[in-house]
Every structure is written in C-alpha cells, then in structure tokens.
Image (cartoon, rainbow, N blue to C red):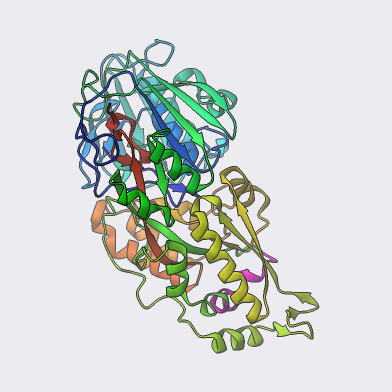
Amino acid sequence: MRSRTPLIALLGATALALTSCAAGAPPGGGDSTDGVLADGKTFTAVMATDPGTLDPFTTVMGSARQIDRYLYGRLVEVQNDGEVLAGLAAEWEADTETATFTLREGLTCEDGTPLTASDVAANISFIGDPANGSPLAGLQVQPGTTAVGDDAAGTVTVTSGRPDAFLLQNVGSISIVCGTVVDDPDARAAGEGATGMFTLTEITPNSQYTLTRRDDVTWGPGDWDPEQPGLPAEVVYRVIPNETTAANLLLSGEVNSALVLGPDRQRLRDAGLFSTELPLAAGQLIFNQAEGRPTADQAVREALAQALDLDQLGQVLTGGEGTAAKSLVTIAPNPCQADVVDGLLPEFDEKAASASLDDAGWKVGSDGVREKDGVAMEITLVTPTTLGNGGSAAAELMQATWKTLGVTATVKTLDAPALSETLFATGDWDVSAAPLGVSLPSMLVPFYSGPTPPNGTNFASVTDDAYTTAVSAASSKPGTDGCADWNAAEEALFTSVSVVPYANNVLTTFGQKATFTEGDGIDPASIRMYE
C-alpha cells in the first residue's frame, strides 16, 4: 500500500518500495528467520530529525508527514502501479474539475465520534481557501477548491479551483483530520484529531514520539483485515541523527527499522536484514531567484552549476550507489516516465564558468573573491541533515569548488524545522541542496511558480513564463494525455537553470523482526511484527 504525497527535505518525500516483502511475509536475516508473527508488539523506528509541527495542513517536511501517516486517514490509497484502492472512501468518481467520494460506513475519530462527510469536506475546503495559507494549496488541492458533504448520503463532492489533471490522486491523498480540529492549528500541530490507525500518546521533542493503535479502526487500504496477526499495538519513533548509531541499534534489535543512506548499508546487508529499496531524488540544486540574491541572475546560476563535476558530486553524495536523474518526478506512479534531463544540464567547464561570471560583472578581487559593485560574492548553501554523511561531503565539495571559482560559500546543515524556517520564512539562502521528490508532475507547480512565502510555496521565487505556459496546457488534459506538456514544463526549468537535478539515490530502509512496505515512509497498515 503505497500512498503518494510530496515532501521536501526528507530526501524528497514519498518513496517506492521495490524489494520489500509482501505484507505478512517473514523478514529476512537477523534473529527473525523463524517467521513467527507476533501480536501486541511495539514497532520502534528511527527518524533522523525532529519533525517539528505535525499539522498536516501546513507541513511539507518528510519527518512530520511520516508521523501523520499513522495518525490520519486518506480518501484513497494510490498504488505503485497507479491503481487506486479504497481508503476512507469506498467509491469515487473524478475528472479534471470535479470529484465525488462516497465514504465507508462506520468511520470514527480518535474520540469515538463519527467522521462525517461534512468533516471531510471541511478539510478539503480549508486547504483550498487561499486565505488559510496552506502550502498544500496548488500542491494537492488547487487554490479555490471547495467541497460539500452530504452526511445522510455519506458523499463528498469536490469542485476544483482550476483544472487538475490528477484530481483524484491529489485530493484523495490528503490527510483527513477530525472536524473538531479543522480550525484549531494548535491541536493539529500536536497531532490531535486522528482519523487513522494510531493516536499520538506522547511527545518528547528531539527524542521520541509514541503512537498507540486504535482498536476501533476496522478499515484500511482496500480490503485490509484489522484482525490479521502481526500488527503492532504501539509505534515509537526515536530521533537519532547519526546513521552509525541507528545501524548499531538495528543490529542489536533495539529498534525495528532505520533508513540508512551511507556506508553502514553494507554491513546491514551483510547481516541479512529485511530491507526495502527506495529510488528517490537525492542530488538537486535549487537556486534562490529573489531580488537582491546573486543567483537571481541566470548567468550566475549557470556558472555555479558549470563549475561542478555533477557526476563526481553524485558519486560523493550517494556513496557510489546513485543513478543519473532523469526527471524531477522520481516516485511512482510517475505517469509520464520520461527522461527530460539528458542534455539540458550545464556541462562541467571551469573555464566557461569563470568567463560567465566575468561577463556578468563579477570580477576576482585581490583577495581571490569575486565582487561586483563593491559587493563580494558570498552565498549560503543549505543542506538537510537527512542527506547524512554523503550530503555533508557533497556540500564540502561544492564549497571548495566554488572557492576556487572565487565564490565564498557558507554551508548550513539544517534539521527539518530549521530548513523549513529558512526556505519558507526567512529566505536567507542562495542555493538549496534539499531535494524535492514528487510522484505527479502537477505537484511541482506551487514550488516553481506562483506566490512566494509567506503567501505560497514558491520558495525560490521562480518566474518562468515557459514553465507556466506548459503547465497551463498540461493541467487541462487528464492523466497521461498531458505528458508532452508536463515534460516541456520541466525542460523549461532546466533551461533557465532554476533547478539542477544531478543524482537519484537508492535509499535503503532496513527492518529487524519486522516487515513493511513504504509510502510516505513506512505504511502503518503494512507493518508485521515477528518474534
């Protein structure tokens, strides 16, 4: 069961499990080879950074949306191959402008009160109302979208604010909160108003998040059976930034799951542990084009990219396990399946990079640092802690390369809350190495066009007429009918050097005495525990 919701900062967002066992299959290796399912266990997992706010209406951070995955149900569950399964909704109809969802019977909130069609409609309308400032507006719910619930019939009718080629997948995959917290941001930030399998029972910031399974949840993806053996009674997420520490805890059996990006992967593989492999965006450079930033100039953006050996940088970032990026859409179902990157990224050429900066008026001073109009070229590179040791090494390589070019780069390695604050609030950055991963091309639109923070999520202040023209053409065409236009939209971003996607990684999540499949992180309905 793999849902598709975009995330930023946790190496993109949703993830596709390629080698995970089917639900209920015994885990491989470790002490789990007997394959005996166990009930009532605690599933302990590792996250690299504290999630900060858990508000599903406002967060786009991967660690927060992982916790939300346990707390909040979704109308539909979109599979890796594009198949749509029942979630909170049992039936649905949709085109590019309207959608109708018929809810399952017996849905309840964490306090036992019914989850009504009106409650669900209020969720969708809240996100769609631009006055509420949700970053999901334009991402999953088009601005101006409204929904009406018929409680007697159990139906929710959605009218999209503008055409959405993937209306069913987008609106159907938002996290639904109870009606009591729709207008209560403090409650949402604390993870209240659960409609999913678990409730949040304890928070120790920067340390641990504890969730308890709800006995009254009898629904799940498709025909999921709540009585099947091996489901955990409790889930604990521990905040452990150091990958080696996480790997050691996994091998000792103290934790059941950890995402490992770096060299510790090999010893976990050698131990024969269960694992899932997740191809996801890893190496991306996004340039801040806000007025007054050096990177507002395309010549500067191109020069900074030209100075880098992107192949070498990708190897450093991924520990030699990465692959070349083909698209900004990296996660299944990825309906267009096209290679739109090849030939469009700046080619490695140090002399050309230097000449471009000279031509743009950035001359090398006596101290070796370029300056223009008396202002030194000093830039800030932000990179997320979730990229691990490889991310730090890649950032150091970029810093050293740009120094040779005459550019002073300050590297800031940030956890999820700090990264969110920097990108979406202060705007004090020039180059972001935080990759953005999505499963549908429409999900990219609010990040590369439209309002800038605090009024929108166009955090890099991108203004690209070719991109918006292609998006407009694609949005009116259902599904894959618009792929040629979606591809043209991406190509425009590469041509303007707004984003440079240079590597994908294979992210490996290991399991000890547990199996699972992945959606936004681990899908709670798929977890099976073993003795």
| 339 in relation to 299, above or below | above
Left or right: 308 in relation to 367: left
Residue 457 highlighted magenta (yes or no): no
Residue at figure coordinates x 57%, y 36% from the top left:
52
What's the magenta bit mostly, secondary-structure-wise?
helix
| 506 in relation to 108, above or below | below
Q: Position of residue 258 (x, y in %)?
A: 41, 42
Q: Position of residue 124 (x, y in %)?
A: 42, 32
Residue 368 shows in this picture: yes
Residue 454 shows in this picture: no
Q: Name the one closer to the observer, 273 or 319.
A: 273
Placement of the N terminus among the 4 image quadrants: top left
Q: Position of residue 214 (x, y in %)?
A: 37, 16
Placement of the C terminus among the 4 image quadrants: top left
Q: Quadrant of residue 401?
A: bottom right
Q: Name the one closer to the observer, 479 or 406.
A: 406
Q: Name the one closer to the observer, 339 or 198.
A: 198
Looking at this view, name the residue that lies furthest to the top. 112
Task: Tally the numbered discs.
Answer: 0
Q: Position of residue 476 (x, y in %)?
A: 32, 53
Residue at figure coordinates x 42%, y 74% from the top left:
311
Left or right: 444 in relation to 369: left
Q: Quadrant of residue 511?
A: top left
Q: Quadrant of residue 354?
A: bottom right
Q: Name the one closer to the observer, 121 or 67.
A: 67
Magenta residues span 291-303
Residue at figure coordinates x 33%, y 65% from the top left:
487
